[in-house]
Image (cartoon, rainbow, N blue to C red):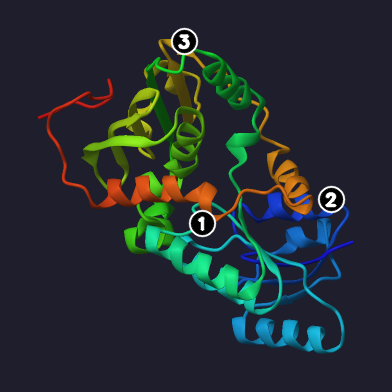
Amino acid sequence: MKNFALIGAAGYIAPRHLKAIKDTNNNLIAALDKFDSVGIMDSYFPNADFFVEFERFDRHIEKLKRKGTMLDYVSICTPNYLHDSHIRMALRSGADAICEKPLVLNPWNVDALADIEKESGQKIYTILQLRLHPSIIALKQKIANGPKDKVYDVDLTYITSRGNWYDISWKGEEAKSGGIATNIGVHFYDMLSWIFGKVTANQVHLREKNKAAGYLEFNQARVRWFLSIDENDLPKVIRKKNQRTYRSITVNNEELEFSTGFTELHTQSYQEILKGNGFGLLDAKQSINIVHNIRNSDIIPIGEKHPFVKFK
Protein backbone atom coordinates (compact mmCIF):
# COMPACT_ATOMS: atom_id res chain seq x y z
CA MET A 1 0.00 0.00 0.00
CA LYS A 2 1.41 3.37 -1.07
CA ASN A 3 0.98 6.66 0.80
CA PHE A 4 -0.50 9.58 -1.13
CA ALA A 5 -1.04 13.28 -0.50
CA LEU A 6 -3.46 15.35 -2.57
CA ILE A 7 -3.12 19.07 -3.35
CA GLY A 8 -6.31 20.68 -4.64
CA ALA A 9 -8.83 18.53 -2.80
CA ALA A 10 -11.76 20.92 -3.35
CA GLY A 11 -11.34 21.09 -7.12
CA TYR A 12 -13.58 19.72 -9.86
CA ILE A 13 -11.22 16.90 -10.83
CA ALA A 14 -10.15 15.87 -7.31
CA PRO A 15 -12.88 13.21 -6.82
CA ARG A 16 -11.49 11.23 -9.77
CA HIS A 17 -8.09 11.17 -8.08
CA LEU A 18 -9.59 10.24 -4.71
CA LYS A 19 -11.44 7.38 -6.38
CA ALA A 20 -8.31 6.26 -8.23
CA ILE A 21 -6.26 6.18 -5.03
CA LYS A 22 -9.01 4.18 -3.30
CA ASP A 23 -9.60 1.84 -6.24
CA THR A 24 -5.90 0.96 -6.42
CA ASN A 25 -5.94 0.03 -2.70
CA ASN A 26 -3.69 2.83 -1.54
CA ASN A 27 -3.91 5.35 1.30
CA LEU A 28 -4.37 9.11 1.37
CA ILE A 29 -2.60 10.48 4.43
CA ALA A 30 -2.96 14.24 3.85
CA ALA A 31 -4.77 16.72 1.62
CA LEU A 32 -4.56 20.46 1.00
CA ASP A 33 -6.85 23.13 -0.39
CA LYS A 34 -7.37 26.76 0.57
CA PHE A 35 -11.10 26.08 0.27
CA ASP A 36 -12.62 23.80 2.89
CA SER A 37 -15.53 22.36 0.86
CA VAL A 38 -13.99 18.90 0.87
CA GLY A 39 -16.74 16.73 2.32
CA ILE A 40 -16.21 14.39 -0.63
CA MET A 41 -13.18 13.08 1.28
CA ASP A 42 -15.55 11.32 3.72
CA SER A 43 -16.55 8.99 0.91
CA TYR A 44 -12.97 7.88 0.36
CA PHE A 45 -10.50 8.79 3.13
CA PRO A 46 -12.26 10.25 6.19
CA ASN A 47 -9.14 9.80 8.33
CA ALA A 48 -6.81 11.77 6.08
CA ASP A 49 -5.40 14.96 7.62
CA PHE A 50 -6.61 18.12 5.86
CA PHE A 51 -5.02 21.57 5.67
CA VAL A 52 -6.03 24.93 4.23
CA GLU A 53 -2.54 26.44 4.51
CA PHE A 54 0.36 25.19 2.41
CA GLU A 55 2.91 25.89 5.16
CA ARG A 56 1.14 23.65 7.68
CA PHE A 57 0.63 20.96 5.08
CA ASP A 58 4.32 21.05 4.15
CA ARG A 59 5.36 20.94 7.81
CA HIS A 60 3.05 17.96 8.43
CA ILE A 61 4.56 15.99 5.54
CA GLU A 62 8.05 16.72 6.86
CA LYS A 63 7.04 15.64 10.39
CA LEU A 64 5.62 12.36 9.10
CA LYS A 65 8.81 11.69 7.15
CA ARG A 66 10.96 12.22 10.26
CA LYS A 67 8.75 9.74 12.11
CA GLY A 68 9.25 7.16 9.38
CA THR A 69 6.00 7.57 7.41
CA MET A 70 7.22 8.16 3.88
CA LEU A 71 5.14 9.80 1.20
CA ASP A 72 5.19 7.87 -2.09
CA TYR A 73 3.09 10.09 -4.36
CA VAL A 74 1.63 13.60 -4.41
CA SER A 75 -1.44 14.02 -6.62
CA ILE A 76 -1.80 17.57 -7.95
CA CYS A 77 -5.22 18.96 -8.94
CA THR A 78 -4.52 22.66 -8.47
CA PRO A 79 -4.92 25.61 -10.89
CA ASN A 80 -2.68 25.24 -13.93
CA TYR A 81 -0.22 27.99 -13.05
CA LEU A 82 0.59 26.31 -9.71
CA HIS A 83 1.41 22.87 -11.12
CA ASP A 84 5.10 23.64 -11.53
CA SER A 85 5.51 24.73 -7.91
CA HIS A 86 3.55 21.83 -6.46
CA ILE A 87 5.48 19.30 -8.55
CA ARG A 88 8.70 20.70 -7.09
CA MET A 89 7.29 20.36 -3.57
CA ALA A 90 6.42 16.70 -4.23
CA LEU A 91 9.92 15.88 -5.44
CA ARG A 92 11.54 17.74 -2.53
CA SER A 93 9.45 15.56 -0.21
CA GLY A 94 10.92 12.43 -1.74
CA ALA A 95 7.69 11.54 -3.55
CA ASP A 96 6.76 11.08 -7.18
CA ALA A 97 4.29 13.62 -8.62
CA ILE A 98 1.04 12.82 -10.43
CA CYS A 99 -0.20 16.01 -12.06
CA GLU A 100 -3.40 16.85 -13.91
CA LYS A 101 -3.27 18.34 -17.40
CA PRO A 102 -1.81 20.65 -18.49
CA LEU A 103 1.39 19.57 -16.77
CA VAL A 104 2.76 23.13 -17.05
CA LEU A 105 1.98 26.22 -19.13
CA ASN A 106 5.28 26.74 -20.97
CA PRO A 107 7.80 24.47 -22.73
CA TRP A 108 10.73 25.77 -20.68
CA ASN A 109 8.95 24.65 -17.51
CA VAL A 110 9.17 21.10 -18.81
CA ASP A 111 12.92 21.43 -19.30
CA ALA A 112 13.41 22.84 -15.80
CA LEU A 113 11.38 20.03 -14.26
CA ALA A 114 13.44 17.47 -16.18
CA ASP A 115 16.55 18.79 -14.42
CA ILE A 116 14.88 18.57 -11.01
CA GLU A 117 13.56 15.10 -11.76
CA LYS A 118 17.08 13.96 -12.59
CA GLU A 119 18.56 15.58 -9.49
CA SER A 120 15.94 14.17 -7.12
CA GLY A 121 15.71 10.69 -8.55
CA GLN A 122 11.91 10.97 -8.39
CA LYS A 123 9.42 10.74 -11.28
CA ILE A 124 6.88 13.20 -12.65
CA TYR A 125 3.74 11.70 -14.17
CA THR A 126 0.87 13.43 -15.91
CA ILE A 127 -2.70 12.35 -16.63
CA LEU A 128 -3.18 11.86 -20.39
CA GLN A 129 -6.35 9.83 -20.10
CA LEU A 130 -7.40 9.97 -23.76
CA ARG A 131 -4.43 7.72 -24.58
CA LEU A 132 -6.20 5.02 -22.56
CA HIS A 133 -9.63 5.38 -24.21
CA PRO A 134 -10.51 2.27 -26.28
CA SER A 135 -11.71 4.29 -29.30
CA ILE A 136 -8.54 6.38 -29.33
CA ILE A 137 -6.34 3.30 -29.00
CA ALA A 138 -8.22 1.68 -31.89
CA LEU A 139 -7.71 4.76 -34.06
CA LYS A 140 -4.00 4.86 -33.28
CA GLN A 141 -3.67 1.20 -34.26
CA LYS A 142 -5.60 1.82 -37.47
CA ILE A 143 -3.31 4.71 -38.45
CA ALA A 144 -0.18 2.78 -37.47
CA ASN A 145 -1.25 -0.19 -39.60
CA GLY A 146 -2.18 1.98 -42.58
CA PRO A 147 0.01 3.57 -45.25
CA LYS A 148 2.87 5.52 -43.68
CA ASP A 149 2.58 8.32 -46.23
CA LYS A 150 -1.17 8.79 -45.90
CA VAL A 151 -2.33 12.15 -44.53
CA TYR A 152 -5.77 12.26 -42.90
CA ASP A 153 -8.23 15.16 -42.73
CA VAL A 154 -9.43 15.69 -39.16
CA ASP A 155 -12.03 18.06 -37.72
CA LEU A 156 -12.03 18.54 -33.94
CA THR A 157 -14.95 20.35 -32.33
CA TYR A 158 -15.37 20.69 -28.58
CA ILE A 159 -17.96 23.00 -27.03
CA THR A 160 -18.49 22.76 -23.29
CA SER A 161 -20.75 25.52 -22.00
CA ARG A 162 -19.66 27.42 -18.92
CA GLY A 163 -21.57 29.98 -16.86
CA ASN A 164 -20.54 33.43 -15.65
CA TRP A 165 -18.53 31.89 -12.79
CA TYR A 166 -15.86 30.77 -15.27
CA ASP A 167 -14.60 34.32 -15.95
CA ILE A 168 -14.47 35.11 -12.24
CA SER A 169 -12.50 31.99 -11.37
CA TRP A 170 -8.81 31.40 -12.10
CA LYS A 171 -9.87 29.65 -15.30
CA GLY A 172 -10.91 32.99 -16.76
CA GLU A 173 -7.41 34.46 -16.33
CA GLU A 174 -5.07 33.51 -19.14
CA ALA A 175 -1.99 33.98 -16.96
CA LYS A 176 -3.35 31.33 -14.58
CA SER A 177 -5.13 28.90 -16.91
CA GLY A 178 -3.31 29.43 -20.19
CA GLY A 179 -6.55 30.35 -21.92
CA ILE A 180 -9.21 28.24 -23.63
CA ALA A 181 -6.91 26.19 -25.85
CA THR A 182 -4.75 25.21 -22.89
CA ASN A 183 -7.45 24.67 -20.31
CA ILE A 184 -9.94 22.59 -22.31
CA GLY A 185 -7.92 21.59 -25.37
CA VAL A 186 -4.52 20.35 -24.26
CA HIS A 187 -5.55 16.69 -23.90
CA PHE A 188 -7.00 16.74 -27.44
CA TYR A 189 -3.75 18.11 -28.85
CA ASP A 190 -1.87 15.41 -26.96
CA MET A 191 -4.15 12.76 -28.42
CA LEU A 192 -3.63 14.09 -31.96
CA SER A 193 0.15 14.17 -31.45
CA TRP A 194 0.15 10.64 -30.09
CA ILE A 195 -1.73 9.32 -33.12
CA PHE A 196 -0.50 11.44 -36.03
CA GLY A 197 3.09 12.33 -35.14
CA LYS A 198 5.05 15.56 -35.01
CA VAL A 199 3.57 19.00 -35.57
CA THR A 200 4.66 20.63 -38.81
CA ALA A 201 2.33 23.67 -38.89
CA ASN A 202 0.30 25.61 -36.33
CA GLN A 203 -2.03 28.44 -37.40
CA VAL A 204 -4.47 30.36 -35.20
CA HIS A 205 -7.62 31.72 -36.87
CA LEU A 206 -9.58 32.77 -33.80
CA ARG A 207 -8.52 33.49 -30.23
CA GLU A 208 -11.01 35.08 -27.87
CA LYS A 209 -11.61 34.72 -24.16
CA ASN A 210 -14.33 32.10 -24.59
CA LYS A 211 -13.37 30.39 -27.87
CA ALA A 212 -10.45 29.62 -30.14
CA ALA A 213 -9.88 27.92 -33.47
CA GLY A 214 -7.10 27.10 -35.86
CA TYR A 215 -5.31 24.64 -38.07
CA LEU A 216 -2.62 22.09 -37.22
CA GLU A 217 -0.57 19.86 -39.45
CA PHE A 218 1.02 16.68 -38.18
CA ASN A 219 3.09 14.11 -40.06
CA GLN A 220 -0.09 12.24 -40.93
CA ALA A 221 -2.95 14.68 -40.41
CA ARG A 222 -4.41 18.04 -41.36
CA VAL A 223 -6.53 19.22 -38.42
CA ARG A 224 -9.12 21.98 -38.27
CA TRP A 225 -10.04 22.62 -34.64
CA PHE A 226 -12.61 24.68 -32.75
CA LEU A 227 -12.94 24.99 -28.95
CA SER A 228 -15.53 27.02 -27.08
CA ILE A 229 -17.22 27.52 -23.73
CA ASP A 230 -19.95 29.71 -25.30
CA GLU A 231 -23.32 27.92 -25.35
CA ASN A 232 -24.31 30.00 -28.39
CA ASP A 233 -21.83 27.97 -30.43
CA LEU A 234 -23.70 24.72 -29.76
CA PRO A 235 -25.37 23.22 -32.85
CA LYS A 236 -29.13 23.74 -32.87
CA VAL A 237 -29.85 20.02 -32.59
CA ILE A 238 -27.80 19.88 -29.38
CA ARG A 239 -29.52 22.92 -27.88
CA LYS A 240 -32.95 21.46 -28.65
CA LYS A 241 -31.99 18.47 -26.51
CA ASN A 242 -31.02 20.88 -23.68
CA GLN A 243 -27.48 19.51 -23.76
CA ARG A 244 -24.62 21.83 -22.88
CA THR A 245 -21.70 19.91 -24.34
CA TYR A 246 -20.86 18.93 -27.91
CA ARG A 247 -17.80 16.87 -28.78
CA SER A 248 -16.95 15.66 -32.26
CA ILE A 249 -13.87 14.28 -34.00
CA THR A 250 -14.08 13.22 -37.63
CA VAL A 251 -11.28 11.48 -39.51
CA ASN A 252 -11.76 11.64 -43.30
CA ASN A 253 -15.42 12.55 -42.63
CA GLU A 254 -15.91 9.48 -40.43
CA GLU A 255 -17.09 10.24 -36.90
CA LEU A 256 -14.98 8.87 -34.07
CA GLU A 257 -17.28 7.60 -31.33
CA PHE A 258 -15.86 8.36 -27.89
CA SER A 259 -18.77 9.88 -26.00
CA THR A 260 -18.59 7.16 -23.35
CA GLY A 261 -15.87 5.18 -21.60
CA PHE A 262 -14.33 8.02 -19.57
CA THR A 263 -15.43 7.05 -16.06
CA GLU A 264 -12.54 4.73 -15.17
CA LEU A 265 -9.69 6.36 -17.09
CA HIS A 266 -8.15 8.05 -14.04
CA THR A 267 -8.10 4.74 -12.20
CA GLN A 268 -6.46 3.11 -15.23
CA SER A 269 -3.94 5.95 -15.30
CA TYR A 270 -3.05 5.29 -11.65
CA GLN A 271 -2.77 1.57 -12.28
CA GLU A 272 -0.22 2.20 -15.02
CA ILE A 273 1.70 4.74 -12.92
CA LEU A 274 1.92 2.29 -10.02
CA LYS A 275 3.38 -0.26 -12.45
CA GLY A 276 5.94 2.30 -13.62
CA ASN A 277 4.26 2.77 -17.00
CA GLY A 278 2.74 6.23 -16.57
CA PHE A 279 3.12 9.16 -18.96
CA GLY A 280 5.96 11.53 -18.13
CA LEU A 281 7.54 14.83 -19.12
CA LEU A 282 8.53 13.83 -22.65
CA ASP A 283 5.03 12.53 -23.35
CA ALA A 284 3.52 15.90 -22.41
CA LYS A 285 6.02 18.17 -24.12
CA GLN A 286 4.62 18.37 -27.64
CA SER A 287 1.11 19.31 -26.47
CA ILE A 288 2.62 21.98 -24.18
CA ASN A 289 4.48 23.38 -27.19
CA ILE A 290 1.27 23.40 -29.22
CA VAL A 291 -0.78 25.35 -26.67
CA HIS A 292 2.08 27.77 -25.98
CA ASN A 293 2.30 28.57 -29.69
CA ILE A 294 -1.48 28.94 -29.98
CA ARG A 295 -1.41 31.38 -27.06
CA ASN A 296 1.39 33.48 -28.55
CA SER A 297 0.95 33.28 -32.34
CA ASP A 298 -0.44 36.03 -34.53
CA ILE A 299 -3.99 35.56 -35.80
CA ILE A 300 -4.01 34.51 -39.46
CA PRO A 301 -7.17 35.64 -41.30
CA ILE A 302 -6.88 33.04 -44.08
CA GLY A 303 -6.28 29.31 -44.26
CA GLU A 304 -7.95 25.93 -43.66
CA LYS A 305 -10.67 27.22 -41.37
CA HIS A 306 -12.96 25.12 -39.22
CA PRO A 307 -16.61 25.22 -40.41
CA PHE A 308 -17.63 27.00 -37.18
CA VAL A 309 -15.27 29.92 -37.91
CA LYS A 310 -16.45 32.85 -40.00
CA PHE A 311 -13.60 35.04 -41.21
CA LYS A 312 -14.36 38.75 -41.24
**Does residue 130 appear left or right of residue 288 in this picture?**
right
Residue holding disc 2: 24
In front here: 231 or 49? Answer: 49
Whether 47 is drawn above or below 197: the answer is below
Q: Is mark 1 on a helix, strand or loop?
A: loop
Q: Is mark 2 on a helix, strand or loop?
A: loop
Tag shown at residue 103: 1
Residue 261 or 49: which is nearer the viewer? 261
Disc 3 residue type?
Answer: Glu
Look at 45% across and 44% down and name the residue there. 186
Q: Can residue 106 be seen in this view?
A: no
* Of callouts 1 and 2, the N-terminal one: 2
x and y percent of residue 107 in the render?
39, 58
- Measured in 3D between alpha carbons, the distance from the residue under mark 1 to the one under mark 2, in whole angstroms, is 23 Å
Residue type beneath disc 1: Leu
On residue 254, the disc is 3
Q: In this view, does 243 lie to the left or right of 30?
A: left
Judge the density around disc 1: few (<14), some (14-19), many (≥20) Cα neighbours within 10 Å.
Answer: many
Instruction: Give, as a three-letter code, the residue at label 2.
Output: Thr
CA distance for labels 2 and 3:
36 Å
Count of marks, rendered view: 3
Q: Residue at x 40, y 36 (%)?
A: 198
